[in-house]
Amino acid sequence: MALGKYSRVDGRKSSSSYCSTVTVVVFVALCLVGVWMMTSSSVVPVQNSDVSQENKNEVKTPVTESNAENNNDARNDENSKPVVEDNGPRDEGQQKQFEDSQGDLPEDATKVDNNVSTNQVEKNDNPERTENNNADKLEEKPGDEKKDDVLEKKEDGPKDESENATKNKVDGEPQVENKESESGETKANNPDDNEKKSEENSVKTDGEKGEAQVVEKEENKKDEKTDQGPIEKKDNPPEVFPSGAQSELLNESTTQNGSFSTQATESKNAKEVQGASQPQNQNTYSWKLCNTTAGPDYIPCLDNLEAIMKLRTTKHYEHRERHCPDNPPTCLVPMPEGYRRTIEWPASREKIWYRNVPHSKLAEVKGHQNWVKVSGDYLTFPGGGTQFKHGALHYIDFIQQSVPEVAWGKRSRVVLDVGCGVASFGGFLFDRDVLTMSLAPKDEHEAQVQFALERGIPAISAVMGTKRLPYPGRVFDVVHCARCRVPWHIEGGKLLLELNRLLRPGGFFVWSATPIYQKLPEDVEIWEAMKKLTQAMCWEVISITKDRVNGVGIAVYRKTTSNECYEQRPTNDPPLCKDSDDPNAAWNVPLQSCMHKVPVAPSERGSQWPEQWPDRVGKPPYWLTSSEVGVYGKPAPEDFVADYEHWKRVVSNSYLNGLGINWSTVRNVMDMRAVYGGLAAALRELNVWVMNIVSIDAPDTLPIIYERGLFGIYHDWCESFSTYPRSYDLLHADHLFSKIKKKCNFMALVAEVDRILRPEGKIIVRDKVEIISELENIFKSMQWEVRMTYSKDKEGLLYVQKTMWRPTEQEKITYAIA
């Protein structure tokens, strides 16, 4: 009785408790459904709202016919299941998803549970096709626009996402939506990270799970769109980083190794590669200021005072030649006090900031000849010189009036100006479409080359001493000397014979000096010696005239185009060089008092004059034959064309538009690894000039660069370049750093880049992804601003800008201190 009584009481209590529980559960469920409906209306497309509601309530009914008809229902049903600890098979599918797809969501969206159904994994069985779809979509916008888009999306909220999801169709065809491309930063997804996220999500509340599932459905819809195969595009928008699948360019430099689209196209291995390539301690980079006698003007290979002091003689200007230290410096050169951003071209030709090159000695010595004057905060350049006090343009036009065959900017395109002063001659030849390599030593004419570079005029610090100049033979159309103070006539004419090596057959030597028009005993003696020497060299006197405006005389000589004159000379003096002597050999080669024979075979370089400018820039030289193999492995003429087309496409679609460079601030450009000079040719319509560098251990393509009307120089990047600090606005390094890393001091090259690049100057590096990652960290340690990084297929691009930052601690360079 008692037992039954108690049973009835328990039953009543149980029933009442049960009803209360059901009421609470139903109420909570309705609230959750209401909240979910409010949120899902702004996130999930309308057509899937029913399925999503069913999944929200987690009604686990068997799916039969509908599962076969609608794959979306199956995916949503799969995603609606609670998170469990046993994710073995699902983790494998998840990993395969990240292998197949480059990542369709921004990083913050991947923080939710990312379970993937088996059907989805099976459908996503074509990773190559999916990757190409993503890449094509990403190349439709420049990087800067994508960054703006993602900022707008974050501010607009879920509503904009639903609108974008609806708009992501063109003519009924679904489009791949890659939100990661809009995040401005790409990181590869890691399966291990996803496992950890799954474990974290397993302890979330029901409301958090619902929010996660909403995002999950968005991800599945994107994956389904991706799985539908290649998308046919009606229009082809401009590419940010063109693909240009030219296999012939891959063998040598991998320049064309896939398209550099945006950061969102990095592969899933990017994070692993970056982690492996980065130093174990990124904060170990430390920088010091170079403490030298030269201070802000330090040129390591020209200011090695220790080596200069050991020279036995300086009779032949040995102290002005290169003497590079065994261990190149890794310190940073200080800036002049009060340094300011350089004045833009063409205004810079007339004036520069005095504080940038704070030297007034030349103005005191040469001011009366209109070289340079100090005017308040500026150094001004009236455009004169020792031989053209009344302006360089009159002097330039007078030369052509005297010798019409010179034809500035047509027949004569590439000029060498020896003893250039402040390079006003070369600066004003730009008005005649002529490119001038100005050359002068670092001597008592204080900072003359530095003035030229600050003005935006090409120049290098070099001297005609005991070694050949670092140029190939027979490349300059005109060589000019205006009171250049070079003793051409002494020691058998050794220095003039070096000019003969550099001058094209049929090219002109323009000499403006006092022996031509003055009758002082010394001048008469030099003139007679020059007459005898030039006749023996078979140079023809074309014109000897006097410019009455400037009161100077000009003599113009032309180099012979045949060997008949050499054979008919009464004496072999100067002698002909041995056939084994290569006229193109120019790196640390001693000067020789001999002349090389003129090439006469139709297929030899130098036997014909190049085509007129600008036709010569885009055509393969006549002496490149199909029997020769080019740098990239194809027949040489085809190789040349492929390289030119590649760089035209890169410049047009990427450098001019995709990187956000303000080209009005760019004047002095250096291509640190030029090959055929394709980059310089592609930039020729801009107001820039490009110094093309051909490494001494690379294929010797520098003659090709000159043949197309461009210029450059040989160099070894294990040593410092012969230029002043802060000389260039833009540096371009295509697979240079990876080669140097195998060869010599990597950090010394980085310090050299800092030395020759101006504050607010830029560098574009194209190289292997591990090199890009390492350089990014190094540049950040120097407080440089990283503007853009891209990578794909283990190749990358880095675009950074130097800042005004300088370290405070100093490093004493003992060999550079007097």
Image: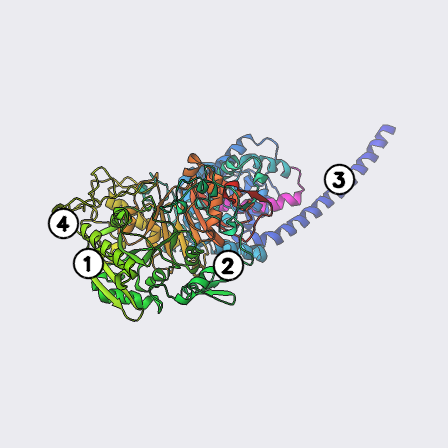
Amino acid carrying mark 3 in the image: Tyr
Residue under label 3, please give it.
Answer: 18
User: Magenta stretch mostly in which secondary structure?
Assistant: helix
Instruction: Give the image's coloring scheme.
Output: rainbow
In the displayed structure image, the side of residue 598 where residue 29 appears, left or right: right
**Mark 4, mark 3: which one is toward the viewer?**
4
Q: Secondary structure at mark 1?
A: strand
**Mark 2, mark 1: which one is toward the viewer?**
1
Q: Within 10 Å of the Cα at label 3, are there few (<14), some (14-19), or many (20+) other Cα atoms?
A: few
Amino acid carrying mark 4 in the image: Cys
- Residue 98, x across and y down, in percent: 49, 38
Residue 541 numbered tag:
1
Residue under label 4, please give it.
Answer: 565
Circle nearer the N terminus (3, 1): 3
Circle nearer the N terminus (2, 3): 3
Circle nearer the N terminus (4, 2): 2
Q: Secondary structure at mark 4?
A: helix
Q: Residue furthest front?
A: 521
Residue at 36% x, 41% y: name it.
Answer: 253
Instruction: Name the residue nearer the viewer: 78 or 591.
Output: 591
In the displayed structure image, the side of residue 271 where residue 202 appears, left or right: right
- Residue 69, x across and y down, in percent: 46, 43
